[in-house]
Image (cartoon, rainbow, N blue to C red):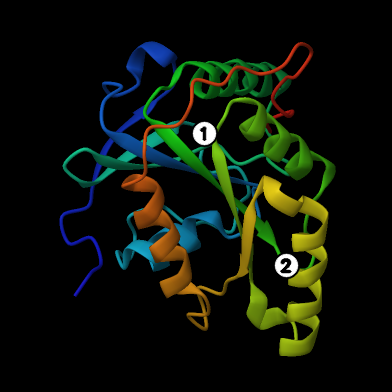
Amino acid sequence: MSAYPHARYLKGAHDPSQFVPDTGREVAFAGRSNSGKSSAINAITQRHGLAKTSKTPGLTQLVNFFELAPGQRLVDLPGYGFAKVPRPVREHWRGLMDRYFRERDSLAALFLVMDVRRPLSDTDRQMLAFARACGRRAHLLLTKADKLSRSAGLTTLAHVRREVGEQATAQLFSATHRTGIDEARRALRQYLGAKEPGDGEPSPGQTNPAWG
């Protein structure tokens, strides 16, 4: 049985005016366009096809809202890094993400998804810093852990944890081999049931990373 049997797609937003009502709690998923973000969402929710997967980077071009349970949402954010999209689209994404993180009171935490073979890119670091500046918790999913040996995966995980320190929690994850799914699901439930996040604003000069 699915961990979220009543999970359903609500809508995709191309503009902040199209965001769903800012009530309850939600957790956002972000990551590079080839990080396995959609596969991770589907594995954690146990809902095949809830988030659309594709071999073509940059498929997610909207802020997609999913209801997991009444008052609890998962938000799939546009991928960044390798998306081959025109500059005007990238600029639009930047503005959209800036508004989402600064103004969304129901946003409790960020799941930052990254390929364990290429963790903590400059853009990943920017995203982590931006989430922290906005007062949001962060959890790192080091996906595609099946592509490394167990020893290499644990070494990478230890390195990532040392680098991020108290900025975020981190874990190994593989949608293919179902590694870390229970751990990720516990983190998601914790954030969705957590106390409202503080009203944090980015410090002066802090901006969101270059989406797309």
Cα separation between marks 2 and 1: 24 Å
Identify the residue position indicated by label 2 in the image: 116
Dot 1 falls on a residue whose secondary structure is loop
Q: Residue at x 31, y 47 (%)?
A: 193
Q: Residue at x 76, y 35 (%)?
A: 126
Q: Is residue 179 above or below residue 76?
A: below
User: Residue 194 appears at what percent x and percent y?
Assistant: 36, 44
- Confirm or deny contact between disc 2 and disc 1 (CB under 8 A): no
Q: Residue at x 26, y 21 (%)?
A: 21
Dot 2 falls on a residue whose secondary structure is loop
Q: Is residue 61 above or below residue 147?
A: above
Task: Sort mark 2 into few (<14), some (14-19) or many (20+) by Cα contacts within 10 Å.
Answer: many
Instruction: Please indicate, yes or no, whether residue 118 appears anywhere in the rendered image.
Output: no
| Nearer mark to the viewer, of 2 and 1 | 2
Question: Between disc 2 and disc 1, whose residue precedes?
Answer: 1
Check the picture and name the quadrant holding the N terminus. bottom left
Residue 113 quadrant: bottom right
- Looking at the rendered structure, which numbered label has been put on residue 61? 1
